Image (cartoon, helix red, strand yellow):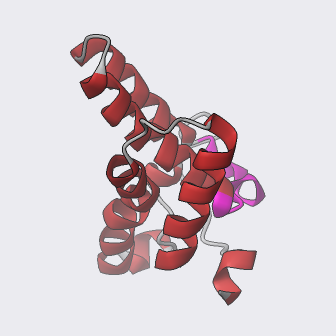
Amino acid sequence: MLFWHLGASVAVARYTFRDEKMDLRFLAFGALLPDIVDTPIGLLMWDSFQSVRLVAHSLLAAVAIMVLVLIRTRRGRPRRRWMAVAVGMLLHLFLDAMWDSQQTLLWPFLGTEFSGQTYDTVGGYI
């Protein structure tokens, strides 16, 4: 899944935004961030969650990063770089097909539980 998130996120962002100034390092970091945060927690607390898709796999996390970037930065290069992290997180959710797990995607609006059900995605086969 590492290369799926990295490669597909860069390709989708390049095609969609056509922004040569986008810092791909920040985009790649954002594309991996949900797994970097949630996988260790999910594995360590498997008995509680039965999933490795937790808070960082929710829209709330990506939107919170966007709002934080908008509040903490001024216009210009730093804002563009850090906004790429949030874009990478949103692309991660799209590439993970998180719409199949609405309870996690829309956490905490549909409840505070995380779906223990895992869905295979195209990326699972790459």
Q: Residue 6 in the image: state x and y as whole percent.
A: 49, 66
Quarter where residue 66 is shown: top left
Q: Is residue 97 magenta?
A: yes
Of residues 117 and 73, the one nearer the viewer is 73
Residue most toward the bottom?
Answer: 125
Please indicate whether residue 107 sits to the left or right of residue 79 in the image: right
Q: Quadrant of the C terminus?
A: bottom right
Quarter where residue 43 is shown: bottom left
Main SS of the magenta part reads helix
At 65% from the left and 61% from the top, the residue drawn is 95
**Residue 92 visible in the current orientation:** yes
Of residues 115 and 66, the one nearer the viewer is 66
Please indicate whether residue 68 sits to the left or right of residue 32 in the image: left
Q: Residue 114 in the image: state x and y as whole percent.
A: 55, 58
Q: Is residue 3 above or below residue 85?
A: below
Residue most toward the front?
Answer: 20
Q: Residue 25 in the image: state x and y as whole percent.
A: 33, 54
Q: Residue 70 in the image: state x and y as whole percent.
A: 35, 16
At 68% from the left and 47% from the top, the residue drawn is 15
Q: In this view, does 79 lie above or below 35?
A: above
At 25% from the left and 26% from the top, the residue drawn is 78
Q: Is residue 30 magenta?
A: no
Q: Is residue 95 above or below residue 90?
A: below
At 32% from the left and 60% from the top, the residue drawn is 37
Magenta residue span? 95-106
**Residue 114 visible in the current orientation:** no
Of residues 80 and 91, the one nearer the viewer is 80
